[in-house]
Amino acid sequence: MIVIASLLTFVLGFIAMTHFHWAMGGHWPASDETALARAAVGTPGVARMPPRKASAAVGLCLAIAALLPQMLTGGRLAGLLPAAVLAVVTELCITVFALRGVAGFTNWWRSRFPEQPFATYDRRYYSPLCLFVASGFAVLLFAR
């Protein structure tokens, strides 16, 4: 369980830091804002990133989610949340990540987010990663 928790914390922490970087106006891993928007947002004709506050909000949610695996496995953060609250928050994360992961493989999603390279990245990386995260949280929650 420690390996799964560590992987989830690392992955979610890294993605959170990337969103904070975008919230500060950074464009990594793209060369400019338009290229980043096409890779990270994917709506038709997108040329700009969403407002910086939106990136910061997503980053904050992901940073909080990155702490959950450590709480679930009894690390230093164990006991930070009451067990019932921890279970509900974890179930919420499972639901959000699973729905996002499955959505990426639907025709409806593809019609809403067709911009390249987002569409390709979404099928290859983003959606499978969301399903991995949902599965990891499920394993940690039900192994408790």
Image (cartoon, rainbow, N blue to C red):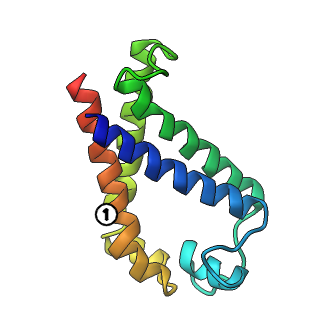
- The image quarter in which residue 109 lies: bottom left
Residue type for callout 1: Pro
Q: Position of residue 59 (x, y in %)?
A: 62, 50
Instruction: Specify whether residue 132 is in view.
Output: yes
Q: Position of residue 37 (x, y in %)?
A: 63, 77
Q: Nearer the viewer, residue 49 or 63?
A: 63
- Identify the residue at horizontal 53%, vertical 54% (top origin): 14
Q: Position of residue 71 (x, y in %)?
A: 43, 25
- Identify the residue at horizontal 21%, vertical 27% (top origin): 143
Tell me the quadrant of the picture where the N terminus can be found.
top left
| Secondary structure category for the residue under label 1 | helix
Q: Is residue 144 shown left or right of residue 84?
A: left
Vertical placement of residue 82 versus 95, above or below: above
Vertical placement of residue 8 versus 28, above or below: above
Q: Position of residue 91 (x, y in %)?
A: 36, 32
Q: Nearer the viewer, residue 14 or 51?
A: 14
Instruction: Specify whether residue 108 is in view.
Output: no
- Identify the residue at horizontal 42%, vertical 30% (top origin): 70
Which residue matches tag 1? Answer: 128
- Identify the residue at horizontal 44%, vertical 18% (top origin): 78
Q: Is residue 80 shown left or right of residue 92?
A: right
Tell me the quadrant of the picture where the C terminus can be found.
top left
